[in-house]
Image (cartoon, helix red, strand yellow):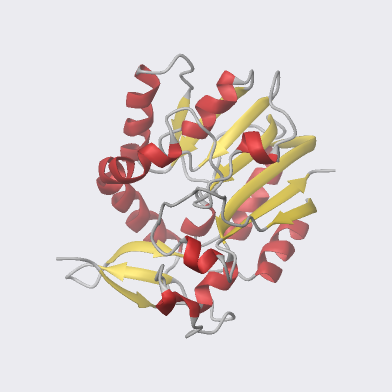
């Protein structure tokens, strides 16, 4: 039975269990559908198609210590390794890390991996120069403020935290890549989680919504300085439709927000 979507509360433990199970099961299908777009050793920031080579948001990686949270198949981490960075890829899902291990085996730039929760990172304070997430972890935890605080904790002074996630405005619109996705039907300010439930009514997949203001307040509360919010337009020549992301919608509303932060 296909999980049924609804909006209802979902706490940290329910979110964690649902998303770990979802990505454990879905990892092979996710790679089969999106692996060609993402590449095995490429750093793609989102469905719009812009890469770190294009945007340069990490501030350079050679000779630096980097951490990826929600690494999935660790494509971005292998790009970092290929460009001279020392990187660790982490993910909550063992299934996603199995994909990463398989891709490591065929790459000249394999990376170390660790399974952990992004709100409880198993690293000492000030361990990394750069922490990043390309659509990883941030919308899939109930306590996004805790995630940001953890990133700030393990980041060195002068270090950078950069993450991409669904642009908050998308939560006001249906998740439809066509014309039906261009009419707002929900409140931008409704922070009730999106939950897909199985036939027993248990959560099978959970995403949490935050407004732009919420994200900024979480970063400031963690002692980080927000340097930029990048709202990438659709890259010319990109014809891929990824769920609700499409050239049609990108002509009117942003699909991705990339937050660029620094720890003083």
* Residue 143 position in % (x across, y down): 55, 60
Image side of residue 112 versus residue 34, left or right: right
* Residue 172 position in % (x across, y down): 52, 78
Give residue 189's quadrant in the image. bottom right
Q: How many marks?
A: 0
Nearest the viewer among 136 and 115 is: 136
Residue drawn 56% across and 50% down? 236
Location of residue 61 with respect to 154 vertically, above or below: above
Residue drawn 28% across and 41% down? 32
Of all residues, the one furthest to the left in this rendering is 1
Residue drawn 73% across and 65% down? 217
Of all residues, the one furthest to the top in this rendering is 108
Image quarter hosting the C terminus? top right
Nearest the viewer among 61 and 112 is: 61
Give residue 98's quadrant in the image. top left
Nearest the viewer among 183 and 179 is: 179
Location of residue 190 with respect to 200 vertically, above or below: below
Residue 223 can be seen in this image: no
Image quarter hosting the N terminus? bottom left
Of all residues, the one furthest to the front in this rendering is 237
Location of residue 64 with respect to 90 vertically, above or below: above
Residue 144 can be seen in this image: yes
Nearest the viewer among 175 and 26 is: 175
* Residue 100 position in % (x across, y down): 38, 30
* Residue 220 position in % (x across, y down): 77, 58
Residue drawn 51% across and 59% down? 139
Image side of residue 249 versus residue 150, left or right: left
Location of residue 241 with respect to 109 vertically, above or below: below
């Amino acid at each position: 039975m296909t999980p049924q979507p609804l909006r209802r509360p979902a706490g940290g433990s329910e979110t964690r269990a649902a998303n770990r199970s979802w990505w454990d099961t879905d990892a092979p299908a996710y790679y089969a559908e999106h692996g060609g777009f993402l590449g095995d050793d490429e750093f793609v920031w989102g469905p719009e198609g812009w890469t770190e080579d294009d945007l340069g948001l990490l501030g350079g990686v050679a000779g630096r210590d980097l951490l990826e949270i929600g690494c999935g198949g660790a494509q971005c981490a292998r790009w970092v390794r290929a460009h001279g960075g020392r990187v660790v890829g982490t993910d909550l899902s063992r299934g996603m890390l199995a994909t990463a291990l398989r891709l490591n085996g065929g790459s000249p730039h394999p990376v170390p991996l660790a399974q952990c929760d992004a709100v409880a990172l198993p690293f000492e304070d000030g361990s990394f120069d750069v922490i990043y997430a390309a659509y990883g972890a941030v919308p899939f935890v109930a306590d996004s403020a805790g995630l940001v605080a953890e990133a700030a904790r393990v980041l060195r002074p002068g270090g950078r935290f950069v993450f991409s996630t669904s642009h908050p405005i998308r939560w006001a619109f249906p998740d439809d890549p066509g014309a039906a996705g261009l009419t707002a039907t929900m409140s931008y300010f409704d922070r009730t989680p999106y939950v897909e439930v199985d036939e027993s009514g248990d959560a099978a997949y959970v995403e949490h919504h935050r407004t732009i203001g919420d994200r900024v307040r979480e970063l400031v509360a963690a002692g980080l300085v927000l340097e930029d919010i990048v709202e990438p337009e659709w890259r010319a020549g990109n014809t891929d439709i990824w769920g609700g992301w499409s050239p049609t919608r990108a002509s009117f509303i942003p699909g991705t927000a990339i937050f660029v932060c620094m720890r003083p």
